Image (cartoon, grey):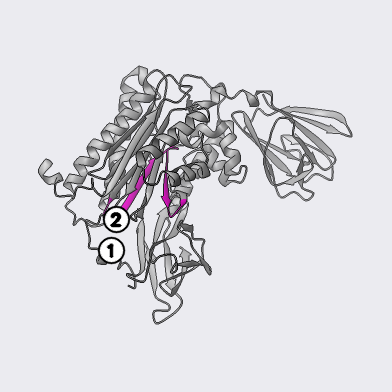
Amino acid sequence: MAKLTVSFNDQVVAEYELDKESMTIGRKPDNDIQIDNLAVSGHHARVLTILNDSFLEDHNSTNGTYVNGHLVKKHALQDGDVIAIGKHKLAYSNEQASSGEDFERTMIIRPDAAGMPEKENTGDEAIDRSVGRLGAELVAESKQVSGDAQRSAKLRVVSGANAGKELQLTKALTTLGKPGVQVAALTRRAQGYFLIQVEGGDDSRPKVNGQTIGPEAVKLEDSALIEVAGVKMEFFLD
Amino acid sequence: MIATAARRPDLSDRLAIVAITDAGRKRSHNEDRVGSDPGRGIALVADGMGGHKGGEVASGLAVETVLQRLTEGLGRLSGRDDDIDGYTPESDLARRVIEESNRIIHQTAASQPQYEGMGTTLAVALFYDDRLTVSHVGDSRVYRFRAGQLEQLTRDHTLMQELVERGFYTPEEARASLNRNIVTRALGIDAEVQVDVQEDITLPGDVYLLCSDGLNDMLGDSAIRLTLAEFDDSLDKGAQRLVDQANEQGGSDNISVVLVKVLKPHPTRRSWFKRFVDWFQ
C-alpha cells in the first residue's frame, strides 16, 4: 500500500497509509493528516487514491503545495515524490506502482444506484481493493457530464437584418448557413456543442471568436461568437 | 423483410469498409469482435471483458444482436419519419438497439453462472443521408480523418478520462497510467445502460476509424494519423498496418480496427437542398 511519510526539519514525525480513497491534509483537527503549523492552511490539500494510483490536489491553500520543488494544483503522485507544505515534507512511496500486469485487463467500475461502494467485475484477476466511494463519485459525475450535453442551448444573430433573432438548439445536429456559400453544422457531443464546417472550402471557413476554424470540430463555450456565411451569432447555454 | 429493406439505397458503392481484429501478442484469446454491413452503412467494434469465455460471448452477442436488429429496424424506416427528441430516426433506432443488446447480454450473464459479470464495450457507426450517427458505450473509440487531420469523436467512458478532465493527467500521461483500463460504462453489467449518441455530417473522402483500446493504448493519435495519411488510397493496407504497428509496440491487448471511407455522397432521406435549410439559408 502507498504511504506518506511526514517529516519536519529532516525528522520523521508521522507516517500515513493511503488506505482511504480521500485523505485530507491541513492544519485543522478534522483532517486525516493534521499538520499543526501556521504555514499550513486549515484545509490545505487532499490525496485521492484509486486502486494503486494516488493524486494530490491543492485546495486553494494560502502558501501553496509543492512537489519536488514545483508548485502544483493537481498532480499524479509517483513513487519517490516529495510534497512540501509549509516547512513540512511528505514523502510518497508506492512500491506496487510498477507491477502493472494485473492492471492490463480492462475492468468495470460498477456503482449501485445510491452511489455506495460498488463491486468490480475484474475478469480473471481479483482486485483486492474496493475502488471505493470516489469511483462512484467520478462515475456519477461522468453521467452528469453526459447529461449536461443534453442541456439546451441557443444561437442569437447579432449582425445583419436578422439581428436579435434566436434559434433554440434542440437537435443532435443543426446545419447553418447558405448552400453554395458556406455551411456549418452544430453537433452535440458528450462534452457539449461543437461547430464544424460542412461546405465552403479552405478559403471560406466559419469563425469562432474571430478565429477561422480548421477541418476539426471546435467546442463552443458559453457566449462564443460564431460567424457562418457572413452572419455573426452568439452561442448561449441555457 | 427483404422487400422492405430494399427500399433503402444500397451504400456498397458509396462506402468502403474494412474490419479486422487480432489477438495481439500477449493474449491467448481474442475477446474483441468487429462487424460491418457496407450496403446498410453499418460498422461496429466490441471489446469484451469477463472471465472464462465471458468476454468473447459478450462482445459476440453485442455485434450479432446490434447488426441484426439494426438491419431489421432500418428496413422498417420509411424514409419519411420525423426526428425524435432532436435525433434522426436512425439515431433513435441505434440507441434502442444498443439498449436491447445490453438487456440480452445482461440476461445471459444472469442466467448462466459461467458468464457472471461479463460485459463489453461497443462503438457503432451508422451512415445514411450524408450523415453519421456514432453511438458508444465504454472505451472503444471512433475517430474521423478529414483533410489530413485526425479527430476523436467519442469521449471514453473511463476513470482515466475523468482524471484527465479534472486536470490530474495530460492525455499523454494518461496513456502510460495503470488505471487506464477502468471503464465506467459497459454493456451487460446492469439492466439499463446509458448510450452516448451523436450525429455528424459526412463528406466524401472522410475516413472513420473504429477501434478497441488495444489500438489506441499502443498508438498515439499522431501515429494513427500518419498511417491513415500514408494509406489514404488503400484502406485494406492501412487497417492492417495499424494492427501491425500496435503489435510492434507490444500488442498487449486484442486489437480491432474498422475503417470506413466515404467514397461518394450518399443522400437518401431528404434532398440536398432541404438538408441545409435548418436556419437562414
Q: Nearer the viewer, residue A116 or A151?
A: A151
Q: Is residue B272 left or right of residue B252?
A: left
Residue A178 location, x and y as percent? 34, 71
Query: In which image quadrant can residue A113 be found?
Result: top left
The quarter of the image holding the C terminus of chain A is bottom left
Identify the element where label 1 is drawn.
helix
Residue for point 21% across, 45% down: B74
Residue type at mark 1 is Arg
Q: Is residue B37 magenta?
A: no
Mark identifier at residue B130: 2
The quarter of the image holding the N terminus of chain A is top right
Residue B225 location, x and y as percent? 48, 45
Chain that bears disc 1:
B
Residue B279 location, x and y as percent? 34, 70
Chain that bears disc 2:
B
**Looking at the image, residue B235 lies above or below residue A193:** above
Residue for point 43% across, 33% down: B243
Tell if the residue under mark 1 belongs to the same chain as the one under mark 2: yes
Residue range of the region highlighted in magenta in the rendering: B128-149
Magenta stretch: dominant SS?
strand
- Cα separation, mark 1 vs mark 2, equals 10 Å
Query: In which image quadrant can residue B260 be found?
Result: top left
The reply to whether residue B197 is visible in this rendering is no
* Residue pointed to by mark 1: B275
The reply to whether residue B260 is visible in this rendering is yes
Mark identifier at residue A199: none
Q: Earlier in the sequence, mark 1 or mark 2?
A: 2
